[in-house]
Amino acid sequence: MLIEARDVTKIYGSGRTAVKAVDSVSFSIERGELVLLMGPSGSGKTTLLTLISGLLKPTSGSIYIDGIDITKLSQRELARLRLEKIGFIFQHFNLLSALTALENVMVPLTIKGVKESEARERAIALLKDFGLGDRMNHKPEDLSGGEQQRVAVARAVITNPDIIIADEPTANLDSKKGREVMELIHKRVKGGRGAIIASHDPRVERFADRILYLEDGRLKDSTRISTYQ
Amino acid sequence: MVLIARKNLFHERGRLIISVGGVAFATMLIMTLIGVYYGVFTESTTYLMKTRADLWVGQEGIHDTWHTYSLLPRGLDKEILQVGGVKDVHEFIGRAVMAEVSKVSDSKETVFIIGFDTKSGVGGPWEVIKGKKIPRNGQVVVDRVFAVRNNIDIGDKIKAGGVELTVVGISKGTFVLVYSYAFVTKEDAAEIFGAEDFLNYYMVEVENPFFAEKVAENIKSRLETQGVKVDVLTRQEFIENHKEVIDESFSVILLPLVLIGFFIGVTVIGLTLYTATLEKIKEYAILKAIGAGEMFMMKIVIEQAFTIGMLGFISGALLSLAAANWIPSIAPEFYVEINASNLLISFVAIIAMSVVASLVPIRKLERVDPATVFQA
């Protein structure tokens, strides 16, 4: 299993002000599986993504990434794990504003210590593959929302991570651009990775193999639906 | 990491220019102050360097020309000449006195009158920019700074110790921190000081400078047998003693000013980095989220600090060189010496500034919570 959450609970605060954001959630994701995390605002989707990413420690329960219990790892080990195994895509793209599209895609490789010339070569190839060959020297402010999100996807997958974690990746895109971005993610997942995507967007459903419904921090339902080819 | 650091820094060009300007100012302040310090050293010891004296024979316990004045009886030169290895002996009569400048009413200024042997020229001015080098009785060669300050030219008169002297030459490189040298004949000096039977030092030329120390010991012994207690210093010892005097009085003023320059630099770099860090805090959270470790983040800040520091240092060094050429034209008493040692000290100061200035932004980055990347 690529991701496994066992009875994960996250409580913010303590005593009378304590809020249970995630409540005894258990699920797993296999390789090649694209899982959609749905639920109303405040249902705990983002907290669950943050926990799986190792950016927050659960109050109780365990989370396994490729067989490793990440709740037992140090901050340094977690950073290394995120770099090696996880690619992130955010609702607001979160590109580095001072860097060009190409340089943004190179960032994870730079952090990994890959030689600049090699990182540049790999990033150029990927951006061309994503249809951004003529936009790679533009800064984020000069790119459209769809282009920015494609750059963000390229940044997320440049290191060939096992897992893609995405938070509302289509929320700021029109339907055509949203579909293009989902196609890119879907293609990568079917190449042997796993993905968990938090989204309100019903257009994303058709790309999902399974949908997890969260409500008040609890997993209410898990539906297997995969139809997209 | 270098890419991110530099791109972030150059993204805000206005702020970068201001901070580089601030560091350049701090560098210039430090470099110019150290330059003045070295300049004073050089000016103060040039006379000793230029004078053909390998040994200085003075009254016992007195080791420079500025503190208590050495007093020795005239006529010891014959005894000294008897010592093996001595080539020649010259008298040095010198003391600071108040000089009146008749051209400017009520103008008085301290000058260090030096009476020298006008036949050999030893102890006299070595570079004259106007007039003649060797004065006769009733004449004086004054320093360029003194001349500029008092609007004096060839033919003007000054009065020292009640003796009126006509300016016949203007020398260069003969200004020492607060007063300048003025060169007169031995006879005039004796009259000005009212000490015809005494002088201050005997300047000794030796046949082989390699044996100067041995000759010094022999002179001391020989004069002691004559009942005269002296100290005999080599040129280098005499120079070092003068440097020590300057160091004692000057470093008290210099050190606080250099520290002010240092703190200006630290503050400028620190504020720039801190605001740049705050402005990009969300982007640093993204870097942490995608797997950047503490060391990677720290290197970004340090890289930025050193980029500002180095750009500021280069600009500051160029400004200092310009200042070193310009300052003497408006304040001739200041000689700013930019040498390798000055550059090295300033460079080390900039490195230290960059490191110190990085500490707070690094601490800030350590506290950045990568979980915030999922917040809208």
Image (cartoon, coloured by chain):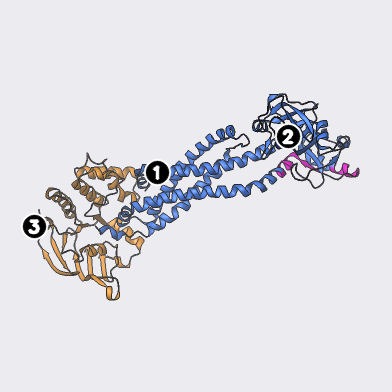
Chain colours: A orange, B blue
> Badge 1: few (under 14), some or many (20 or more) residues near its Cα, within 10 Å?
many
User: Is residue B191 shown left or right of residue B244?
Assistant: right
Query: What residue sits right under mark 2 in the picture?
Result: B100
Q: Find residue B339 and name its label.
A: none
User: For the view shown, which residue lies furthest in the right direction?
Assistant: B226
Query: What residue sits right under mark 1 in the picture?
Result: B16
Q: In which quarter of the image is residue B169?
A: top right
Q: Residue at x 37, y 50 (%)?
A: B276
Q: Nearer the viewer, residue A56 or B325?
A: B325
Q: Which chain is indicated by disc 2?
A: B
Q: Which of marks 3 and 2 is in front?
A: 2
Q: Was residue B231 drawn as part of the magenta stretch in this picture?
A: yes
Residue type at mark 3? Thr
Visible in this render: residue B164? yes
The region drawn magenta spans B220-241
The answer to whether marks 3 and 2 sit on the same chain is no
Visible in this render: residue B52? no
Residue B103 image offset from top left, x and y in percent = 70, 29
Q: Which of marks 1 and 2 is in front?
A: 2
Residue type at mark 2? Glu
Q: Which chain is indicated by disc 3?
A: A
Q: Do the residues labelled 3 and 2 touch (CB within 8 Å)?
A: no
Q: Nearer the viewer, residue B257 or A220?
A: B257
Query: What residue sits right under mark 3 in the picture?
Result: A227
